[in-house]
Image (tube, grey):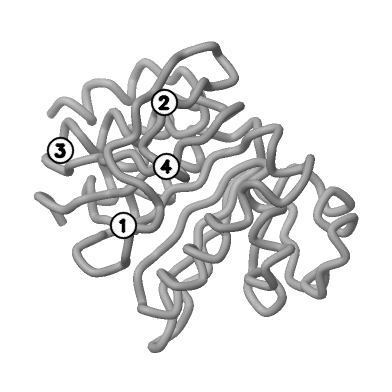
Amino acid sequence: MTGTTVHLAVYDTFADWEPGFATAQLTRHGHTVRTVGLTTEPVTTMGGLRVHPDLALDELGPDGSALLVLAGASLWDTGDTLAPFARAARTFLDAGVPVAAICGATAGLAREGLLDDRTHTSAVSFYLAATGYAGGAHYVDADAVTDSGGESRGALVTAGPTEPVAFAREIFSLLDVFEPKKLDAWYRLFHDSDASAYEVLEG
């Protein structure tokens, strides 16, 4: 799938390194990445970068989007500021459009009830348990997990904060960015520093 629009949520304290592997390759493979803020006012990432959102959250809808990406941020655990993004994720999933969440964003989805009946992962199980969510039985201790969602709901990717490469791999698989052999090579190169994978990836 190429030539589609992927929406990346951005907000103050946004963990800018977490979606970077994914967005770089998506852009290289013909996708358009558009940033979405609570408003169109600039935000400051955890790394101190200033990002000017392309559009405000109230302008965002699942129509015309291939994926909504939610990264971690300190604000996910310090109040309800980012809860509107979790509600947007519900709208996307209900419309059959996938969502990918990493780090603190998984806790936001847990609070919204979106992990109660889906296979998922996060930093550690007790991090999500602290939200009071009802999905503990569906937690998987893995680098990244994709729940297909079935016929009526969009797929959901989740990952822990130390796994931006595995997170990207799940997104690439979901959007058919690489054929399986090259996807495996990309992962081995960037996750395992396997130099032999470079020839496969570039072949």
Q: Which corner quadrant of the image does residue 46 belong to?
A: top right
Looking at the picture, how far across and down is residue 108, in whole percent? 67, 55
Q: Which corner quadrant of the image does residue 15 belong to?
A: top right
Disc 1 to disc 3, how far (Cα)? 26 Å
First along the sequence among labels 1 and 4: 4
Amino acid residing under circle 1: Glu
First along the sequence among labels 1 and 2: 2
Horizontally, is 41 left or right of 76 in the view? left
The local secondary structure at tag 4 comes to loop
Marks 1 and 3 close (CB-CB < 8 Å): no
Tell me the quarter of the image containing the C terminus.
top left
Looking at the picture, how far across and down is residue 75, in whole percent? 69, 37
Q: Which residue is mark 1?
A: 59
Q: Residue at x 54, y 40 (%)?
A: 71
First along the sequence among labels 3 and 2: 3
76 shown above or below 44 = below
Q: Which residue is mark 2?
A: 42
In the rendered structure, find residue 35 and report the number of the disc placed on it.
none
Q: Which of 62/26 is in front?
A: 62
Q: Which residue is mark 3?
A: 29
75 shown above or below 112 = above
Amino acid residing under circle 2: Pro
The local secondary structure at tag 2 comes to loop
Classify mark 1: residues with Cα within 10 Å, few (<14), some (14-19) or many (20+).
Answer: few
Marks 1 and 2 close (CB-CB < 8 Å): no
